[in-house]
Image (cartoon, coloured by chain):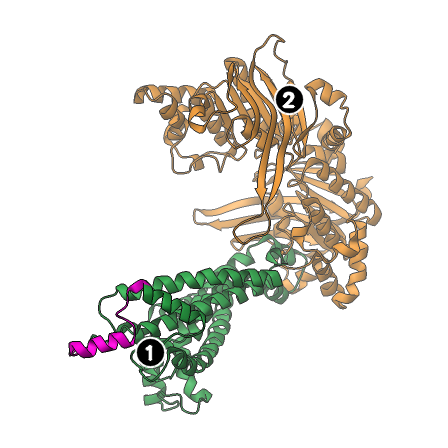
Chain colours: A orange, B green
């Protein structure tokens, strides 16, 4: 069926390269792609696969050091090498784009109404005043509440999801032929993701434009794309109808990607397992505003009366969207931030422990962060990073003993012990996260709080890190609190799930129960957004 | 908005007070005094002078007197220009300094922004290199060199313009001092604009504007330029305060009857009241321009709008 459609964008032998101080880097190595009228083509790949740069190259949006060669014909018109003036008749009118970062893709200094009107005025003529009716119509179309009031809002007055809707309104303004959506939902919460994708879907049905969906998320691909092109390291490894790709993947890489969806489940610990960490009625307040001559100060309650009990060997998954208080709760449980409530670590009541009183306990209470790039000091060797905690908690160790422990820890997380003498920037994201885990487990902790440890990683690497965390838990009897917005990862990692929203627990229970039969409507929304997206 | 302005003006009072206090005591702790001349005065004359100007009283007493007089607008008599009060001297000179300074500010701002934008749009080109080299020279070469060189070329050799004096106040007389005054600030504006413009051109929303086929002129002027002006506007306050309160060097070289000279002359001669007067003047200018710039900033950037 799709084959009978006309090809409106034909990409042939497209190459994108960047000249860097270390020589020329080929980001896209001569790919062929066809976009047919009205279809949804998903371009899938992990970071660095060249999927975004392909589209940037076609649209003339490469960074200053980038060059594009080859051919990309839009309805017979060659876009590669097209003079800027002629290209500007295509982009924004025939082919439009929305981007990954709704927070920064709009100019913060102009109202959204003006920004949506800009492409209309420039491509169709007329004044901004005349375009206003059309802008209101578009805002209505993309589901912005109260368009008449919102049209004069500035981007910072809108949420991320609303800003992405504004981008979509802009993309639709001139009835485009092709809409390129570059990771349109990656920066958004799951429930918002689902709404944005539904919106794109219904708008496509209404207006019949082709959509090129650039994404790393196979869940999105399965439900929204009619055809898929899988990219890896600047090449297209496989192209086909969505159903074929998912059921009969031909390329090894595609199979690997599909298998990388987190799998497995965790058995709950025995009922008799002792409780290792408990927080009762945890509340955390943040001061907002205020200042010497500022307005009146307010208080924002980030965590509001949450109670949690972590058993030996248990993994509690804490799910929630951004702003739900899940990370704050993790830090409060470790007594890293001022908070109220009752806290118990093993048999010790640590509610009133000062910073110095907490210090000896810290080795048993470790934390692993989301961002493996920001959380490792770039000026320390991996060996120094991993052994730093030993200086504090086991100062009696000799240099040789510390080194031996570092070797053990690195081996345990699946890294070559020779990594000790290298620096973090020499490692990939997944390897860095292993280093961060080694830094935590070298102290032989009892409890590890994992704050979105896999969120910055590609799917295939995520799977490996999850396997590693599970193996470490089994070997060392660790208890985890696993914080994530990603339900499929939570499902694979934890035996008990806590769903948070606005600083409170919405629902909690055994993983199977929560996933099979969620009671609360918020949980149900989360589930359907994550698994049917 | 009004409450923002009022709050800021209220916070200016303690700022001024601190500035006045620190300068008062710094001045007094500096060795020497207004009447220590090369040929010492007879002790009796000295004592009389000290008594006339109340300099024989305890320091904290003098301080309290100064503060209470200053609040009423009385900044005392100048010790050097004995027939004038400080307020008169500043009142006479300030219009000249402000006129020259405004021209210089206009030149520095427009020239700097233009040069910086051109450099940013042609980043790493010969033009960029040229503009940045010239602006480095502008910052590093002091105006007591620039002033005489300009005079030598345009007044002496080419005889196009007068070499100095205010004359009838027409533009002919102001061009050279204006350039000498503006050049260092122009260079700073050029560098600031170039940096922020390059940054602005790499933002995501500029990519959006390009992706939507907006003409380069619109991309640069409407979107990049406005964002790039934010740091430039921030620098506007200190620059304006510095230019409008005059420059001792430029006013001396071109014999401009402004207030810039008073600060240096007053400091050298330990003319306590004159120095204090100019300090208060500069402080007020800095405070007022910071306020104006904050309001302007709010107009440019809706995220920091004061309501």
Quadrant (top left/top right/bottom left/bottom right) for the C terminus of chain A: top right
Query: Does A290 sit left or right of B39 as displayed?
Result: right
Whether residue B189 is visible here, answered yes or no, is no
Residue farthest along the top direction in this orientation: A272
Circle 2 residue: A492
Quadrant of the image occupied by residue A187: top right
> Mark number for residue B78?
1
B57 falls in the magenta region: yes
Residue B172: x and y in percent read 43, 88
Which residue lies at the image location 52% right of the left edge and 57% below the top edge? Answer: B199
What kind of element bears circle 2? helix
Q: Residue A247 at what x, y percent from top left?
A: 73, 27
Could you confirm whether marks 1 and 2 are on the same chain?
no
Residue A194 visible to the viewer = yes
Q: Which residues are magenta?
A: B37-60
Judging depth in this view, the residue of A517 and A30 nearest the camera is A517
Quarter of the image where the N terminus of chain A is located: top right
* Residue mark closest to the camera, 1 vs 2: 1
């Amino acid at each position: 069926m799709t084959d009978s459609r006309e090809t409106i964008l034909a990409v042939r032998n497209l190459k994108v390269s960047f000249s860097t101080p270390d020589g020329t880097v080929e980001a896209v190595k001569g790919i062929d792609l066809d976009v047919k009228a009205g279809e949804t083509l998903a371009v899938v790949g992990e970071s660095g696969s060249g999927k975004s740069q392909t589209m940037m190259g076609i649209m003339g949006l490469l960074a200053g050091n980038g060059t594009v060669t080859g051919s990309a014909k839009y309805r017979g018109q060659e876009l590669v090498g097209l003079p800027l003036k002629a290209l500007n008749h295509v982009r924004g009118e025939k082919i439009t784009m929305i981007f990954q970062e709704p927070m920064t893709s709009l100019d913060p200094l102009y109202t959204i109404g003006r920004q949506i009107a800009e492409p209309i005025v420039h491509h169709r003529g007329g004044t901004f005043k005349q375009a206003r009716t059309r802008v209101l119509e578009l805002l209505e179309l993309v589901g912005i509440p109260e368009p008449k009031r919102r049209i004069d809002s500035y981007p910072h007055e809108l949420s991320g999801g609303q800003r992405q809707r504004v981008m979509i309104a802009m993309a639709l303004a001139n009835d485009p032929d092709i809409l390129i959506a570059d990771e349109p939902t990656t920066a958004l919460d799951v429930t918002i993701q689902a709404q944005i994708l539904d919106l794109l879907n219904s708008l496509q049905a209404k207006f019949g434009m082709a959509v090129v969906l650039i994404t790393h998320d196979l869940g999105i691909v399965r439900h929204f794309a009619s055809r898929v092109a899988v990219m890896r390291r600047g090449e297209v490894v496989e192209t086909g109808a969505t159903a074929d790709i998912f059921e009969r993947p031909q390329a090894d890489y595609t199979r690997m990607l599909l298998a990388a969806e987190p799998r497995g489940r965790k058995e709950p610990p025995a009922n008799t397992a002792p409780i290792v960490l408990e927080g009762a009625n945890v509340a955390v307040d943040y001061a907002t505003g205020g200042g010497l001559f500022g307005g009146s100060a307010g208080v924002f309650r980030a965590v509001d009366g949450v109670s949690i009990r972590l058993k030996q060997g248990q993994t509690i998954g804490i799910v929630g969207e951004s702003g739900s208080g899940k990370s704050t709760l993790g830090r409060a449980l470790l007594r890293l931030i001022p908070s109220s409530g009752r806290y118990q670590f093993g048999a010790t009541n640590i509610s009133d422990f000062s910073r110095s009183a907490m210090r000896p306990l810290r080795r048993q209470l470790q934390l692993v962060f989301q961002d493996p790039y920001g959380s490792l000091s770039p000026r320390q060797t991996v060996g120094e990073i991993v052994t730093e905690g030993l200086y504090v908690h086991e100062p009696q160790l000799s240099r040789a003993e510390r080194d031996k422990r570092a070797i053990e820890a690195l081996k345990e997380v699946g890294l070559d012990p020779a990594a000790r003498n290298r620096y973090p920037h020499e490692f990939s994201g997944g390897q860095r996260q292993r280093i961060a885990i080694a830094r935590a487990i070298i102290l032989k902790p009892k409890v590890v709080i994992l704050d979105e440890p896999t969120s910055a990683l590609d799917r295939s690497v995520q799977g490996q890190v999850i396997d590693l965390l599970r193996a470490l838990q089994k070997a060392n009897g660790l208890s985890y609190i696993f914080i994530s917005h990603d339900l499929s990862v939570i499902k694979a990692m934890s035996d008990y799930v806590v769903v948070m929203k606005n600083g409170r627990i919405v629902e909690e229970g055994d993983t199977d129960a929560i996933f099979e039969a969620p009671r609360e409507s918020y949980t149900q929304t989360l589930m359907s957004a994550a698994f049917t997206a | 908005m009004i409450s923002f302005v009022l709050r800021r003006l209220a916070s200016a009072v303690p700022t001024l007070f601190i500035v006045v206090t620190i300068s008062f005591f710094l001045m007094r702790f500096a060795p020497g005094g207004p009447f220590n001349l090369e040929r010492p005065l007879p002790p009796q004359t000295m004592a009389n002078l000290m008594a006339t100007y109340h300099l024989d009283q305890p320091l904290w007493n003098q301080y309290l007197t100064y503060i209470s007089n200053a609040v009423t607008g009385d900044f005392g008599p100048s010790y050097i220009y004995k027939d004038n009060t400080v307020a008169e001297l500043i009142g006479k000179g300030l219009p000249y300094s402000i006129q020259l300074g405004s021209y210089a500010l206009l030149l520095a701002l427009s020239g700097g922004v233009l040069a910086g934008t051109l450099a940013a749009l042609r980043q790493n080109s010969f033009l960029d290199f040229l503009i940045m080299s010239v602006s480095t020279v502008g910052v590093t070469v002091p105006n007591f060199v620039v002033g005489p060189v300009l005079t030598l070329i345009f007044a002496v050799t080419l005889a196009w313009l007068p070499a100095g004096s205010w004359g009838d106040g027409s533009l002919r007389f102001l061009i050279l001092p204006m350039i000498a005054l503006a050049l260092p600030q122009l260079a700073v504006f050029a560098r600031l604009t170039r940096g922020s413009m390059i940054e602005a051109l790499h933002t995501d929303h500029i990519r959006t504007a390009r992706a939507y086929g907006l003409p380069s002129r619109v991309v640069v002027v409407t979107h990049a330029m406005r964002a790039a002006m934010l740091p430039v506007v921030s620098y506007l306050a200190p620059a304006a305060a510095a230019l409008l309160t005059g420059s001792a060097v430029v006013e001396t070289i071109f014999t401009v009857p402004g207030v810039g000279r008073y600060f240096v002359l007053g400091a050298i001669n330990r003319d306590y009241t004159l120095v204090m007067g100019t300090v208060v003047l500069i402080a007020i200018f800095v405070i007022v321009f910071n306020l104006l710039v904050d309001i302007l900033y709010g107009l440019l950037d809706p995220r920091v709008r004061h309501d």
